[in-house]
Image (cartoon, rainbow, N blue to C red):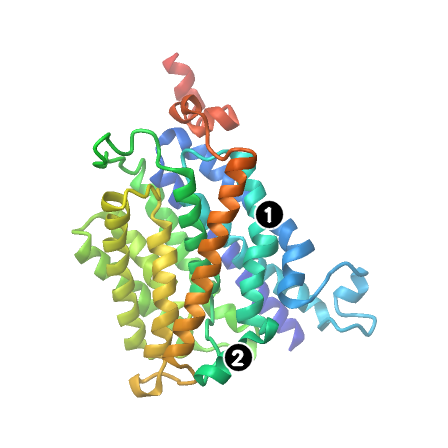
Amino acid sequence: MAGADVLFILMGAVMVLAMHAGFAFLEVGTVRKKNQVNALVKILVDFSMSTIAYFFVGYSLAYGVSFLQSAQIISGGAGGSFAPQGYDLVKFFFLLTFAAAIPAIISGGIAERAKFAPQLIATFIIVALVYPFFEGLAWNGNLGFQVLMEGMFGAKFHDFAGSVVVHAMGGWIALGAVIVLGPRKGRYKADGSPVGIPPSNIVWLALGAWVLSVGWFGFNVMSAQKLEAVTGLVAINSLMAMVGGVLAALLMGKNDPGFVHNGALAGLVAICAGSDVMHPIGALATGCLAGGLFVYAFNLCQNKLRIDDVLGVWPLHGLCGALGGVLCGVFGLEALGGMGGVTFMSQLVGTAIGVVIALVSGFILYGALRSAVGIRLSEEDEYDGADLAIHKIGSTPDEDISRR
């Protein structure tokens, strides 16, 4: 059975790893052509930096486990405390893919005008310290957090697959980063009215959304972490939330393909927290609410608040993640057909704590980096595009040469 559990969670890790390709192509299809190479490189390098940060610092902070021992011990031999056949190692891999989603989320918000090296510094700090702090509270009960929540509100804070721990955390950190960074040049006129910058490639955007959607079933279902704990309820609830998000975004977004494809993601973000406790009808309602919220909040953010969040990661991950955390305490109740074991107040307070930690951390971290090393490309580099300014090559170099 140990070997089956290792394979089970390893497959989950691989599916979520593949989601990072989805993050990359969603960004590639949304940003302008002159920033597509940068989008691809950022996601891969951020994942690599996240691995180092989480292996040496973050995982230990969240779970009190260190891999700085012999390979014989950490693979489950020599009578140590590690599970047999390297289960703890693949569990680390699985949870790493969650942790690395935070900088991948942020990447979409700050696209097209952020410097490369300062963002890598931010990635290391977030994955080593900020994210594991709240992850440890919610998923390991550090500092007596879950005992306190259960004592005060009658149930622990429930976030099965990370609506709040992963998505709201990433989205609200991104909001701080986007505000500190400021809007792209030319995004708003002198009177504050927005200038539309359409996606560069709807096909790549759609591919990114599909890759993310398929991988999400590993993200959610394999969060059981043991083969004996897996349940088809999580899969069906994820499906219902996804389609609810699509249909709500289709209606609210007036057939806009960007909204439709991101609507699927909005529903999946929101269902993570309660996918193991909701009835499928509750999951459908959660997805519909999330899809509608994303469209409304994206337009509000871009056009009224003048927050230049390029991929809309704050509405998508920040707001829909927080919504999912709260709705877990509604549609997860037995009175509404759910499995029970949750309370509205525990979900509301736990979600609010996660949001505050993320938002404050985002402003402090990116504000400090702006003061210390600068976080924004020069006006000339932004005009030329991050591809040439940072990587010295565009996405179609043959075409670039032929135009000279």
For disc 2, the marked residue is 148
Residue 204 position within the rendered picture, expressed as x and y whole percent measured from the top left = 36, 42
Asked which secondary structure carries label 1, the reply is: helix
Number of marks in the rendered image: 2
| Left-right relation of 26 to 18 | left
The residue that appears at 36% across and 68% down in the rendered structure is: 324
Residue 233 position within the rendered picture, expressed as x and y whole percent measured from the top left = 40, 77
The residue that appears at 52% across and 73% down in the rendered structure is: 224
Residue 358 position within the rendered picture, expressed as x and y whole percent measured from the top left = 47, 57
For disc 1, the marked residue is 124
Residue lying farthest to the bottom in this orientation: 335
Type of the residue with mark 2: Leu
Q: Which of marks 2 and 1 is in front?
A: 2
Q: How far apart are marks 2 and 1 (CA)?
A: 30 Å
Residue nearer the viewer, 66 or 307: 307
Q: Report the disc number at residue 100.
A: none
Residue nearer the viewer, 75 or 141: 141
Type of the residue with mark 1: Phe
The quadrant holding residue 183 is top left
The residue that appears at 50% across and 84% down in the rendered structure is: 151
Using the image, determine if residue 170 lies above or below residue 309: below
Quadrant where the C terminus is found in the figure: top left
